[in-house]
Amino acid sequence: MKRFLVLFFSVVLLYSCNQSKEQEPRQPTPKAEESKQFPLILNKIFEAHGGLENWKKMNSFSFKVQKSDGAEVHKTDLKSRKTRIEAETFTLGFDGRNVWKLDPDQTFKGNANFYYNLIFYFHAMPFIISDPRAFYTERKDVVFERKNLGAIHIGFGRSVGDSPDDEYLIYYDKETYKMEWLGYTVTYFEGEKSKDWHYIKYDTWLEESGLLLPETMVWYEAENNKPQKPTRTMSFSKVVVSESVLPESLFSAPVNAEFVE
């Protein structure tokens, strides 16, 4: 998937734009492959969230996310993965080739190349893992917060994105097949496979265009590669998933913007 995976602790989470030491997973851009066969369990997870075919029909995705340093509005073209992020003090985007930044007061302190599609990838779970070069393995059940959950592991081929060694674990309700947790590793900054797992609880959901998408996500501190206690919450609003195509000009670098190396 795209610089995918577009994984808070021993490797610090890049969650806030003003917290340059925080890190999250980097996800490769997936291109949908119509003939790809998925494991039965994964298909059931997709269906529980509105269906992969429904997701594939959509062309644009936008949402507002509330963060500790203010709100951001993210807009993404789902086919090209072009992106625009609008915050109070900066604007960040990806035009399909380059990442650009308009930040006259230099308030953005993170890694723009890493950050521009980061929250989108978390918010687009589980559909975003339908990368044609991803591979899937069912794992043993786990117990998180006294609940028994099924698990499916996602890995990537060596040529996928900037961080092909990134790994993901989707933990799902065994009755409803709804996704409940995401486990992930981060390799973007280290350049090698990681054994440290980090965890997000997909706490509440909302429905938009027939798709079940996260309304709140809670990051957890990990101990012995298991989630232990909540540390941070992201809340999403104004979520729009549409077959409408966003204007191309939206993703072009504005006058005075700088391209990020």
Image: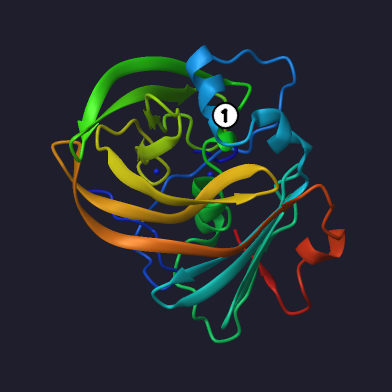
List the single residue furthest toward the left: 224
Residue in the image at 57% along x and 58% along y: 116
Q: Quadrant of the N terminus?
A: top right
Give the residue at mark 1.
46
Residue 99 in view in this figure = no
Residue 94 in view in this figure = yes
List the single residue furthest toward the bottom: 105
Q: Percent position (x, y) of residue 57? A: 78, 37
Which residue is nearer to you in this view: 151 or 260?
151
Please say if 64 is above or below 211: below
Which residue is nearer to you in this view: 98 or 170?
170
Q: Toward which corner of the image does residue 113 lie, by quadrant?
A: bottom right
Q: How many numbered circles are shown?
A: 1
Residue 99 falls left or right of residue 250: left
Q: Percent position (x, y) of residue 84? A: 68, 63
Which residue is nearer to you in this view: 139 or 177?
177
Q: Amino acid at mark 1?
A: Phe
Please say if 221 is above or below 109: above
Please say if 89 is above or below 174: below
Q: Percent position (x, y) of residue 135? A: 50, 18
Q: Toward which corner of the image does residue 168 lie, by quadrant?
A: top left
Q: Quadrant of the C terminus?
A: bottom right
Q: Toward which corner of the image does residue 253 lie, by quadrant?
A: bottom right
